[in-house]
Structures are given as C-alpha cells and as structure tokens.
Amino acid sequence: MPKSQITSDDSVVGSNQNLSRTRTRRGTEETRKSLVLLISLVFPLVGFFHLTISSHLPKFYAVCSREGAKIYTVDDNNTVVQCLVVDHMFIVDTGSLAEDISSRWIAKLASPLSVRYINRGSIIVPGLTDSHAHILEYGASRQLFLGDTKSVEEIITLVRQYISVNADMYDNTSFIEGWGWDHLSWSVKEWPTADAFESDLVVRDRAVVLQSKDGHALWLSKRALELSAPLPREIEGGAIFRRENGEPTGVLLDSAQSLVKKPGLTERDLLRHFTMTIDDALSLGLTSIHDAGYRPVSLAFFERSIQTWQIRIYGMRHFDEKGPYQGNLSTPIINAGNGRLNVRSVKIFADGALRSGGAALCTPYWDNPEEKGFMRIEEQLLHDVVIQYLLDGWQVNVHAIGDCANKAVLDAFEDALQYVNVSALRPRLEHAQILTPDDVIRVGRLGVIASVQPTHVTSDMWYAEERLGPERVKGLYAFRSLHDNGGILAFGSDFPVEDMNPLAGFFAAITRLSPDGTSPKGSAGWFPEQRLSREQALRGMTINAAYASFAEDRLGSIVPGKLADFVVLLQNVMTIPIDRILKTKVLATVIDGRPVYGYI
Ligand SMILES: *[C@@H]1O[C@H](CO)[C@@H](O)[C@H](O)[C@H]1NC(C)=O
Ligand SMILES: *[C@@H]1O[C@H](CO)[C@@H](O)[C@H](O)[C@H]1NC(C)=O
Ligand SMILES: *[C@@H]1O[C@H](CO)[C@@H](O)[C@H](O)[C@H]1NC(C)=O
Ligand SMILES: *[C@@H]1O[C@H](CO)[C@@H](O)[C@H](O)[C@H]1NC(C)=O
C-alpha cells in the first residue's frame, strides 16, 4: 500500500492515550460550549445548532482501528471490520485497511485518503436508537428532578430549594412541576397526599404538580387541586384517590392526570426542554429517538423546529379518543428535514402501568385479589381503531403492559389480517411486558415488534413476583422467549422514566442484574434464561430499532449505502467483563458523517 497516499490524523480519538491531549480536547469542548452559550444569548434560536469544530474532517475519510477488526457493523452476519469509509453523508465501504480499503480507494483518489484511528480498546458501533422515549418530558423532568428521593420530606426540601434558586418561581402564582418520585422506594411505602406540602412555609399555598417516576401518577398540592376543581366523581381509565369524606387526597392516576389545569408551555420552555434532552442524548451515543407521543404539543414543536436539529426523530402521533379520527385526516411525515423527522405511526394506550396497579391483568393481582387493573380504552373501540389505522396504512404502536391488554391488542392485530398484510405494517407493542406463553408465540407469528425497555426489568424485578405470583411472572419481560419465537425486539429506555444511557439497557438485557450486580434471584440475574446475548442486545439498539421505524434501508448498521451514523465507544462493550460496561464512555457520536458530539 502506498503509505504516502494516506494521511494519518490522530488528533481526534486517535491513538493518543496521553492525558494532556485529552485535557486539551476537553478544553476545546469547554470553549465550544461557551461560544455556543454566547451565541445563544445573542440569538436564542442559534443555541439549537451545535457548533461542531471537527478539525477539518474532510468529506471523504476512513475511520480505522489499529487493533484489527473493532467496528461492529451489525450487518446480517454481525460482521466485525477494521475500517469504514465515509463519503459525505454515506458509508461507502467497510473492510481492512491494507487490503480492501487501499485496493478499492487509494489508487482512485486524487488526494490522499484521510484515515482517522480510534483509541486502543475502543470500538465503533452503529448510531444507537432509543425506540421509546419522551423527548420534551425528559427536558421538563430535569428542571426539578426527584428520582432517587427516599421520602416525602426529602421531596418537600427539594421543592423548597427549587423555589428558592429559580427566579421564575418567586411569583407565587407560578406552577411548580417536578418528575420522578416513587413511593415504592420510600421507607414508608404509602401514596403521598396534598397535605405534605402545607407543612413547609415556602412551599405551602403554592401550586405544585409532581409526576411519578413511571409517568402514571400525579401528586398535587392543595392549591393545584383547587385550580383544577371541580373534579368529576370518577373517570374512565383512571383514578382519583379520595378520603372517606370524598375529598381528593392529591393523587391522580392515569387518565385522571389530564384533569389537572395548568398553564401551557411557552416556546421558550419547549426549546429549553428539547435542547436539554438532545444534548444528553448525543453525549450518550443516541442518533435516533422514537418519541412515544405523549402530548400533541411535542409533534407540533418538532414540525416547527425541524430544520435546526442534530438528531433523528421518529414520532408516534398521539391518539386522542375524544378527537376526530386522524388516520385519514393527517398525512404521514416521511423524511422531512433531510430525513431527520418521520411520523407514520400512531400511539394508542391500552392500559396503565404495573407499578401503580393500572396494568390490565386477566386474573387479579397476586397481592391484591380485588384488583385486575384497568384498560384505558374501551376494548371494542381499541379493536376498531387499531384496525382502522392499519387499513389507512399507519403503523400502530400500542402501549400494553398487562397480559389482558397485550392479548386485546394482539387480537386486534390478528383480526386485521382479514384486511391487510399486518406484518408489512410492522405494528408494535410498546412495552409488551406481561404475555401469556401463547401470546409470546403470536408476537412472532404476526410479525409484531416488541418495543421493550430492558431497564424496566431491573427496576421492576424487586417487586414483580409479589405482584404477579410465581407463574405469571415468568411471562414478564420474557425477552429471550420473544426472540426465540421470532419476535423482533427494539430497545428503548422510556426516558425520563428510566436512565437515558443506552448502555444501561444493554447491560440490563444481557445480565438482568442491577448496576450493582444483584438481583432477587442471585448474581446470575433475574430469570437468567431470559438474558439476551450481546449481539442480540446490540441489534435491539440498532438494526431492529431501524426496522421498527421503517428505516433499515438507511440506518441501523454500518453497511455501504447507508447513512453514516456511528458511535465510538471507549471500551469494547462486546467483550469486556460486565462490571465495566456501565463505565464505558462515548468518545464520539456521528450523524450523516459529521461528529455531533466529541471528535473523530
Ligand atoms: C452472510 O453470510 C452468508 C454465508 O456465509 C453469505 O452468503 C452472505 O453474503 C453474508 N451476508 C453479508 C451481509 O455479509
Ligand atoms: C401571593 O403573594 C401575594 C403578595 O405577597 C399575596 O397577596 C397572595 O395572597 C399570595 N397568593 C397565594 C396564592 O399565596
Ligand atoms: C375519516 O374516517 C371517518 C371514520 O371512518 C369518516 O367518518 C370520515 O368521513 C373520514 N374522513 C375523510 C376525510 O375521509
Ligand atoms: C406481507 O408482508 C411481508 C413483509 O413485507 C412479506 O414478506 C410477505 O410476503 C407479505 N405477505 C403477503 C401474503 O403478501
């Protein structure tokens, strides 16, 4: 190979393990951030553009490893290669430097091929996808984040601090919103009440609305309850907790959450929430996010702002039972904004969540023989709209947790077979948590995508058996069974419900252990027969997620012809001991051939 034809450029994630260099890089990163900050102060909208200084990365370049094959392509054979070649936005070749790449390119090129090398120990994987997340809600949740709190008192303290340090909150009519409490992780495992806020001199009389970790419960202060009054006696698909005298206690479940009257988000709020989410996502190696369509306001914002982002979004249109049927009124959005935005699916809720007791089970909860949970939508209506949307060509993504909810959805998909080729429309079960053995088989047979969140396994494993009983629990998060029966697993995190880091999902899927290496069934993992292999887990975050969004011809693997979305990871998560996986950092995130985080 003619050496002179190759310029080797180590300035990026090159083979420098030398710390001063790493520090310099950080320094540049800081400078870059302040520059962005400065510009965003002057022109608020410009904050959207990440200024990327990629040290003259040419439009045509190769990225290679000096240690042989370290690029996990996730092609059909899970091939691992030494180099990838990028031309503008696209991957144009993969293979070994000395043979494939030099013979195919070096002689043809007018100027030397620029080759970047990744660090020793590093690997490249395709751009990662989160197949189920809530983009704007994550940003909102980071304003007053209550995850990891262990008591009501601790939360009241955080609310007080939030009011004290936020100038926006000095006005006592402003709404205080937070996210992330979980009464099951408190020492007193009881639902909180509105009274709790009244004991604090700063917080009392303020309108406070705090969302639970799973997004299925709201905890309101007295003032927030007053502003939302009058509440109906009961609500279909939800619950209003009340005292014996009928007064609401301050907790609203599932569809009752929509009864809260609070001010809408301003454009400034939306932008702040969005930017916070995307910055975190890119730093964690995410190049695509499937937004699980909680609120219509999100989609409207995405459409307005699309020209300015650095990430790909696959949107699920929110299904509003009370609104007009949208399947024939609205048109799918295909590859808007240079392929960054696609919306051709609808998100429908079948039931609630396991944690809050809203998952619709076929037989009562093991720990509460009076309760079977509830459907959030009338079953006949669910059946009809699922089929109607499929007929109109939409992908139908249904939130289904309990075995009865999953069954109802699969019944509708199966009935739709009379009219349409269901597997071609790639319908999805969002969560697909509790399935009967028959329905595990049906998922594969019907070509349904199981859109699962591996970190839910390790969050729920501590209480799931108590709630479901020893038999039914085996059908909860049965990932390996789903896979072995032909089901396609697409991974997500459900952020802000769980940690956004895709490697947390990867770790949970292959170990079924808490980050500290424990599980209720010991150190081999919770139902270890349901663990996935590392290759299977990587596919869940890449090619399967692309398939789940009709993007496998453009995204999801490092294959010539596809868009150049890839991630450089500091350590080889495909081979290192499991206890090092969660410590693995992202060195660079590349979209359309250009770094949007870090450097190559
Ligand atoms: C995968 O391997 C099979 C059998 O070796 C081969 O025929 C096929 O071309 C390979 N596919 C890819 C994408 O490399
Ligand atoms: C807010 O503060 C004003 C002025 O201190 C006071 O008059 C008013 O009653 C307060 N409102 C609420 C809801 O506490
Ligand atoms: C859309 O479908 C609904 C229900 O099937 C129907 O009533 C309505 O007329 C349709 N609208 C259009 C524009 O086709
Ligand atoms: C249904 O669609 C799938 C996937 O596109 C295809 O492989 C299959 O041949 C189709 N089945 C029929 C009966 O057309």
Image (cartoon, rainbow, N blue to C red):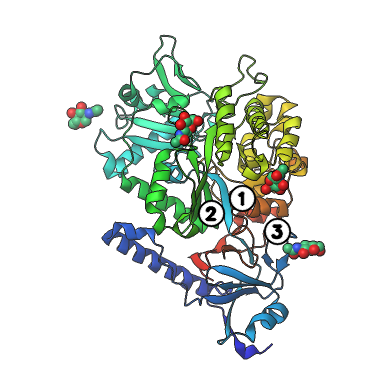
Q: What is the count of numbered marks?
A: 3
If the image is split into quadrants, where does the N terminus sit? Answer: bottom right
Judged left or right of residue 424, residue 210 is left
Label of residue 288 in the image? 2
Q: Specify which label sits upstream in the sequence, 2 or 1.
A: 2
Query: From the viewer's perspective, is the residue at label 1 or at label 3 nearer?
Result: 1
Front residue of 409/158: it is: 409
Q: Are marks 2 and 1 in contact (CB under 8 Å)?
A: yes
Please tell me whether residue 439 is drawn above or below residue 591 in the rendered image: above
Q: Specify which label sits upstream in the sequence, 1 or 3.
A: 1
Where is residue 462 drawn, in percent x and y?
Answer: 65, 33
**Ligand 4 has an atom within 8 Å of the beta carbon of the residue at disc 2:** no
Q: CA distance from mark 2 to mark 1?
A: 9 Å
Where is residue 74 drawn, in percent x and y?
Answer: 68, 59
Front residue of 39/441: it is: 441
* Residue 293 seen from this side: no
Residue at x 77%, y 43% (from the top left corner): 484
Where is residue 247 drawn, in percent x and y?
Answer: 39, 14
Three-letter code, disc 1: Ala
Query: From the viewer's perspective, is the residue at label 2 or at label 3 nearer?
Result: 2
Residue at x 46%, y 55% (from the top left corner): 336
Three-letter code, disc 2: Ser
Residue indicated by mark 3: 574
**Ligand 4 has an atom within 8 Å of the beta carbon of the residue at disc 1:** no
